[in-house]
Image (cartoon, grey):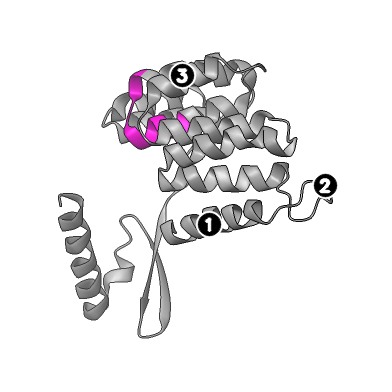
Amino acid sequence: MHGLNLEAIALFDQMTQSACVVSGKHVPNSITFISVLSACSHSGMVEEGRRIFNSMKDYAVSSIEEHYACMIGVLAKAGQFDAALSFLSDMPIKPGPNDWGALSSACRFHKRVDLAEETAKMLSLLKPNDISLHASSSNIYVDGRMWEIGEMIIAEEGLKKSLGFSLIEVNNKLCVFNFGDTLAFKSTYMRHTWNSLSREMRENVFL
């Protein structure tokens, strides 16, 4: 995935180098900038993101909420929350759900529960009937090992999480099983395969 993001940025640079503003040939448009800024966010390329965002005016592309959200994601995903908040407050347009959502997503990624609470309040004001926001808030607390608060949010809103499931392919056969599903482990080979994968995952977490 990281390689694809780098390729997207390289293609953007190639496009702008051969762009002809007069004829409109190969000129990046609004969607182009959203895509490449998103690639910068996923790749943690802050300076590239700044450069590309600032270059929008060179192609007469007006910034909209999605562009600002991408730039907030670029900064916050890289852990630069002060810069992201400053960018948010200096926006010439009123921050919308996409902007606060980008900040909220980064809060979960970095387990910033304190800031996540503020973003959740703003999102609830902007989208009061969006149930997914409450589930997202709950997940942030769970990721931050504050399970009781996470479960309390779900209970207060009367939400019900769907049961998670796992997939594993054994001998070209796809097997599906839920948490606590003992039927899936009747096969000794499947049990051995799953235990081996679980052990590798636990070891990788603490690398």
Which kind of residue does numbered mark 2 sit on?
Answer: Val
Q: Is residue 16 left or right of residue 3?
A: right
Q: CA distance from mark 2 to mark 3?
A: 37 Å
Magenta stretch encompasses residue 113: yes
Which kind of residue does numbered mark 1 sit on?
Answer: Ala
Label 1 CA crowd tier, 10 Å (few <14, some 14–19, many 20+): few
Residue indicated by mark 3: 85
Query: Which residue shows up at 37% across the image and 36% down it?
Result: 78
Mark 2 or 3, closer to the camera: 2
Q: Is residue 92 left or right of residue 41?
A: right
Residue indicated by mark 2: 22
Q: Determine the image quadrant of residue 165.
A: bottom left
Q: CA distance from mark 1 to mark 3?
A: 28 Å
Residue numbers of the magenta segment? 104-114
Task: Residue 45: give x, y in percent of width and height.
Answer: 42, 43
Task: Residue 23: give x, y in percent of width and height.
Answer: 84, 51
Q: Determine the image quadrant of residue 67.
A: top right
Q: Is 176 located above or below residue 19 in the figure?
A: below
Mark 1 or 2, closer to the camera: 2
Q: Secondary structure at mark 1?
A: helix
Which is more N-terminal, label 3 or label 2?
Answer: 2
Residue indicated by mark 1: 10
